[in-house]
Image: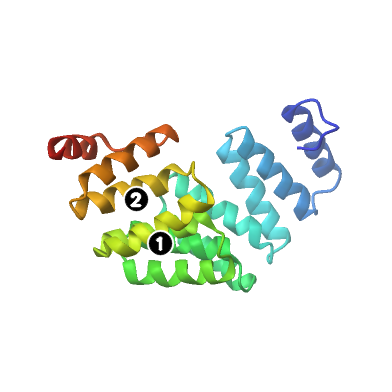
Amino acid sequence: MKERYESLDEYIADLQAEIAQSDNCANHFYQLGMAMLAKHDYVEAENAFLNAVRLSPRLAEGFVQLGGLCLKRGDYEGCLRYNTEASNIRAKYAVPQANIGFCHLQTGDIKKAKSALTKALEWDPEFLQARTTLASAYFMEGKYDACIEESNTVIKAQPAFGPAWNNLALAYFEKEEYAKAKEAVEQAQKCGYEVHPDFLKELQAKI
């Protein structure tokens, strides 16, 4: 939101007034979509982003946002479709590739997930969410050492990143290194990450 506005609602009202006068600016619709996201008004956000990509079919960021809204409602197919479109529009755009990888992982296609995530990290090696998702893929594959390596890389860059600590805990648990798993769980919880209660019970039984 621009600093000159006193509230989000004032910013939205101004954007809507601009659109009412001229409804052919993709950027206005995109900014309206982002403002509606900030208000958690996902229906209006989706409408705004759809208008943005209608007016500017090569607005990759708009397709990424539409994919994110699909993900919120558990529509992995829609998320995959929109992010694939974004990736086709802009070469070497790490964000949609990471989202594609996440969708494939959620639907159980580890090979495709790893391929997309590896591309995302080639283009943006500091993309911590993508690296964490790759660690999850390694975990699902049973490659616990690789999961630990990727998780530690994330933690080194961002010590307060809870999902990476959680992946670390899961991998150490499977390797029967329960003291290390407990330490990682505690770190995840300190970061505000909600560790699955069933895993907590399993870990407590081993200690």
Residue 57 quadrant:
bottom right
Q: State the CA–CA distance, disc 1 to disc 2.
A: 10 Å
Q: Residue extending furthest front?
A: 179
Mark 2: give few (<14), some (14-19) or many (20+) Cα within 10 Å. many
Please identify the quadrant where the N terminus is shown: top right
Task: Name the kind of residue labelled 1 in the image.
Answer: Leu
Task: Name the kind of residue labelled 2 in the image.
Answer: Asn
Instruction: Name the residue located 78 percent from the left edge and 28 percent from the top edge.
Output: 10
Q: In the image, is 177 to the left or to the right of 127? A: left
Q: Indicate whether 19 appears above or below 204.
A: below
Residue 9 percent coordinates (x, y): 73, 28
Please identify the quadrant where the C terminus is shown: top left
Q: Which mark is residue 134?
A: 1
Q: Indicate whether 152 appears above or below 47.
A: below
Residue 202 percent coordinates (x, y): 16, 39
Determine which residue is flagged by label 2.
167
Q: In the image, is 155 to the left or to the right of 174? A: right
Residue 58 percent coordinates (x, y): 69, 66
